[in-house]
Image: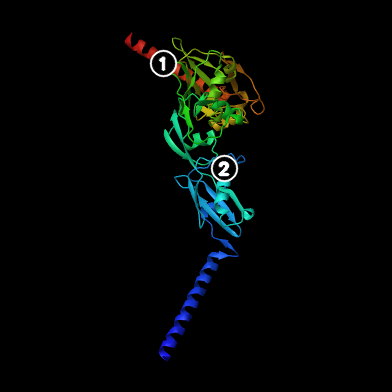
């Protein structure tokens, strides 16, 4: 009998101990009356514009629920339903946020007081957008919520060189939004940067073959749709030339079909119109100054805006014994004429030819050597003539 009583006492102690352990575990999971939440919902939702009650819920959306002193995070499942612990499930897929909130409030009001319940969006769903045409990565792409067209095009690798960026199309259901992507990126027309939505299709058209202008930059070639009213300056901007690295273009070679190539300056681009299928090549002409005469290193030298004639002569290795710097002459222009300039003050321009003359001593020595050589030839000829005679 005593053993039975002891067994019953131990059994009661174990039951109460298990109950205390359960309560301790519950308190650990629910501190200050707040239950644990999903780590996904804890990340703040980025929204460029306000997400109002007309937002349509779908799989991937997360909702935060405040149920009296409990906080829950629920996800919209692939079938469009959400499940609330101890309350049940309700289908909110395809419903606006206002409609879904009302459905959820009706569901939880069976267990909780409605006036102490609240529903809000915690994380927006990702969706897929199709990219087609002249883009680097054609196909279906998963995008973040509230993604604009410019960010989407960058995420798919950008547009190709032969893309027509003046008429990028965003196909939405039965409507088509036409976007001048070039004006948006180069002229700052940000109102054209539309916000993409679920099911959108982005189509970047190609430039039609035989109806374009080829723009050739150092290491890069692209084409622009032809328009008889456009100037070369407009083609340059449409090709994105203003966004490319500035190589220091000096001239433009225009090669029109059936005509010989012609060179124009950059300032003439605003006034120049060309025919279809024209190639426009931008060249970088190195600015040089030429040095010759009584120097050690005759040749071309890179133009330095702060240098004068004496600097170039020194760089070429003038020897004061053989050359003289105070009689330096500069040849300039398409029909060069010698200019007498100050070697330490006057400016030297690209394309100038600097002549360093010989000193008077060297000139006299050369003349003496010439006379000596001439007399030697004459005397040798006279001796041969006398001996032959």
Q: Secondary structure at mark 1?
A: helix
**Given contact means CB atoms under 8 Å apart, are the residues at marks 1 and 2 in contact?**
no
Which mark is drawn over residue 68?
A: none
Label 1 crowd (10 A; few <14 / some 14-19 / many >=20) = few
The front one of 311 and 78 is 78
Instruction: Tell us which disc is closer to us: 1 or 2.
Output: 2
Residue drawn at (50%, 77%), measured in percent from left and top? 16
Position of residue 107 relative to residue 241, above or below, is below
Q: Is residue 287 visible?
A: no
What percent of the width, then of the height, locates residue 264?
Answer: 54, 16
Q: Is residue 25 visible?
A: yes
Q: Residue furthest top?
A: 389
Q: Quadrant of the C terminus?
A: top left
Which mark is drawn over residue 377?
A: 1
Residue drawn at (63%, 26%), measured in percent from left and top? 326
Residue drawn at (47%, 27%), measured in percent from left and top? 204
The front one of 158 and 320 is 158
Q: Secondary structure at mark 2?
A: helix
Q: Which circle's residue, 1 or 2, is located before the other in the chain?
A: 2
What percent of the width, then of the height, locates residue 188?
Answer: 61, 30
Figure disc tally: 2
Colouring method of the image = rainbow
Disc 1 and disc 2: Cα gap in Å? 117 Å
Residue drawn at (53%, 33%), measured in percent from left and top? 149
Q: Quadrant of the N terminus?
A: bottom left
What percent of the width, then of the height, locates residue 132?
Answer: 44, 30
The front one of 271 and 92 is 92
Q: Residue furthest right?
A: 345
What percent of the width, then of the height, locates residue 270?
Answer: 59, 17
Q: Residue furthest bottom?
A: 2
Residue picked out by circle 2: 99
Q: Residue furthest front?
A: 1
């Amino acid at each position: 009998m005593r053993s039975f009583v002891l067994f019953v006492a131990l059994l009661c102690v174990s039951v109460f101990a298990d109950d205390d352990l359960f309560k301790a575990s519950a308190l650990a999971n629910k501190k200050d009356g707040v239950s644990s939440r999903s780590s996904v919902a804890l990340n703040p939702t980025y929204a460029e514009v306000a997400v109002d009650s007309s937002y349509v819920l779908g799989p991937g959306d997360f909702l935060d629920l405040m149920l009296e002193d409990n906080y829950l995070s629920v996800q919209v499942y692939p079938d469009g339903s959400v499940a609330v612990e101890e309350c049940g499930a309700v289908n909110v897929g395809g419903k606006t946020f206002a409609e879904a909130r009302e459905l959820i409030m009706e569901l939880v009001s069976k267990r909780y007081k409605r006036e102490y319940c609240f529903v809000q969006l915690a994380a927006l769903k990702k969706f897929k957008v199709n990219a087609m045409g002249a883009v680097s990565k054609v196909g279906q792409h998963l995008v973040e919520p509230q993604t604009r067209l410019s960010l989407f095009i960058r995420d798919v690798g950008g547009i190709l060189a032969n893309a027509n960026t003046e008429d990028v199309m965003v196909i939405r259901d039965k409507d088509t939004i036409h976007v001048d992507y070039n004006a948006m990126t180069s002229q700052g027309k940000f109102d054209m940067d539309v916000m993409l939505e679920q099911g959108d299709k982005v189509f970047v058209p190609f430039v039609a073959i035989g109806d374009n202008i080829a723009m050739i930059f150092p290491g890069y070639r692209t084409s622009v749709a032809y328009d008889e009213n456009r100037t070369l300056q407009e083609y340059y901007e449409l090709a994105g030339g203003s966004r490319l690295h500035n190589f220091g273009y000096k001239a433009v070679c225009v090669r029109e079909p059936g005509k010989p190539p012609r060179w124009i300056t950059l300032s003439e681009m605003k006034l120049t119109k060309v025919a279809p299928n024209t190639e426009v090549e931008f060249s970088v002409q190195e600015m040089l100054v030429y040095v010759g005469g009584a120097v050690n290193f005759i040749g071309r030298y890179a133009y330095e805006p702060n240098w004068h004639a004496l600097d170039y002569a020194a760089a070429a290795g003038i020897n004061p014994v053989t050359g003289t710097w105070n009689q330096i002459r500069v040849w300039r222009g398409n029909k060069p004429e010698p200019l007498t300039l100050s070697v330490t003050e006057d400016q030297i321009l690209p394309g100038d030819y600097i002549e360093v003359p010989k000193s008077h001593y060297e000139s006299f020595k050369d003349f003496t050597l010439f006379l000596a050589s001439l007399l030697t030839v004459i005397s040798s000829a006279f001796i041969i003539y006398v001996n032959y005679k």
